[in-house]
Image (cartoon, helix red, strand yellow):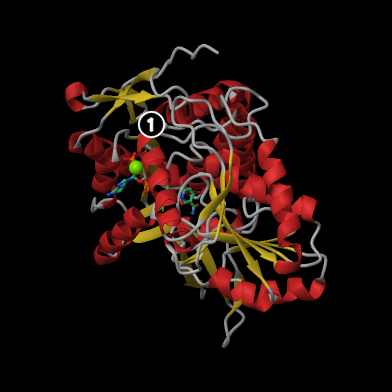
Amino acid sequence: MSMPVSSGKPENYIDGAWTPPQGGQAYQRVSPIDGATALGDFAQSTPHDVEAAIGAAQVALGDWSTLPLAARARILSRCARNLEVRAGELALRMSVETGKPLRESGPEVHRGAAVLDYFAGEAHRPVGELFQQSASTNPVFTVHRPVGVIAVVTPWNFPVAIPIWKLAPALLYGNTVVFKPSEESPWTAQALVECWAEAGLPPGVLNMVGGDGSVGKLLVEHSAVAAVSFTGSSEVGNAIRTTCSAAGRRVQLELGGQNALIVASGADLERAGEAAYAGAFFSAGQKCTATRRIFVHHSRLDEFRTVLVRRMESGHVGDPRDPKTEVGPLVNARQFAGVKSGLEQGLQDGARIVSQSATPDRGCFFGPTLVEGARDDSFLAQEEVFGPVVSLFGFDDLDDAISRANDVRQGLSMSLFTPNLADVALFTRRAQAGVLHVNSPTTGTEVHVPFGGIKASGWGPHEQGRAARDFYTESITVYQDA
Ligand code: NAP
Ligand code: MG
């Protein structure tokens, strides 16, 4: 398959115009499919560009924040339609840039549109709570005000869905935004910003500054930024939290996970095996909610292993633009090196490979890998290796399995496969994760319900659904006497 010719441009989007960065500095993005094809030159922003973007967002705030919610919602709806019209093109950009297979990148674009439609609908729901005062019949009520200029800093693994589930509520509730997409997915980010711009967003309301992490750092440290919403690695997220806390700046973090799937003795093993395959290996394991550890009741362990290995043998690993492909390459060579060394560390600690799928011999492909024999306190069990590597463990008692699944720093998602309601009750009471799945994979989130981790996986209010308003607005209480 020949690679598409990139229409990417080395420009930022500031104050309603595509603008080259100061000094015209650019970097090249190479596709992980072959590790060679250049996808174009993209902007490497400077402090001057960050200042200009924040300045534009400050100026735009006055008019934007005083529009009716419904007027802002109309722009969200138009952006959703623009995304749908360009869905095929956006999905292809995402696939060649990040390696995500089309069978996932296509649905991700449509999910982005659904998130926009959901938040457009929020414009017509209650905007506060009305009470009566204690000593009179006069009202006391809450209103929600925008926070101000928001910095949105995002990773490459969901380059449409994650920016949209931050931008949609930020803009709906009357804030203005400076958006720093990942340096790995600038071409997708450009299309996304074009969809917003063509929806009729006034200049300065949404600005994008491209480039590496230094651009994100300038943004989150800027005194005119009122709040930071970040999704990415724990290392970067924790540094941002320290910066923002010291400055009294609102901050929301969505970080990694070390997610477990537990298979109880009565589980349907075909369904559990399919969920394990999809959860561990789709998007080459590069999802924060990906399955990293599988705990199976000893009475079913041999049978489960057979089912999962068979599924791995019939899996489709290859070019992400082939509609049959289930697993594409990792996003870049650095990520490949990290996954390789993570697996090697696991093997040194005593784990062994049970099955590893073959891959094309080029680009950043890493074969889906199942290991067994890792100790609960070993590197592979404890640390997030951001790729298609999953560890299998046996257990005798479900309560004990949940304790072991909980015994990591992170708490993002967890699954239990069982037909037994008593198991479900125990799991719902004890499992330490922000998202629990019963008889479904650790991955997958709905647009209209809260999403976010507990423990070291998250900080601040959850995202999506009605939870989003808690972060993107300030709640004010009004005592109104005549
Ligand atoms: P990352 O390196 O932390 O990058 C995330 C974003 O932060 C990128 O835009 C990055 O810029 C920027 N950045 C880097 N250093 C920065 C700094 N010092 N200050 C401000 N911004 C900075 O993460 P990633 O490698 O892109 O993504 C993978 C990680 O994200 C995994 O650990 C995964 O678990 C986590 N993740 C979590 C969720 C969730 O919802 N919980 C979802 C997806 C991913 P660059 O362009 O230079 O990278
Ligand atoms: Mg990075």
Task: Judge left or right: residue 56 versus residue 170.
Answer: left
Task: Judge left or right: residue 458 versus residue 23.
Answer: right
Residue at 25% of width from left, 32% of height from top? 45
On the image, the x and y values in percent for residue 112 come to 59, 38
Confirm whether residue 445 shows in the render: yes
Q: Which residue position is annotated with label 1? A: 203
Asked if 65 appears above or below 76 in the picture, the reply is: below
Q: Nearer the viewer, residue 113 or 54?
A: 113
Q: Amino acid at mark 1?
A: Pro
On the image, the x and y values in percent for residue 71 come to 56, 39
Ligand 1 lies under 8 Å from the Cβ of mark 1: no
On the image, the x and y values in percent for residue 214 come to 24, 42
Please tell me whether mark 1 sits on a helix, a strand or a loop. loop
Q: Nearer the viewer, residue 63 or 199?
A: 199
Task: Judge left or right: residue 67 versus residue 396.
Answer: left
Quarter of the figure that contains the N terminus: top right
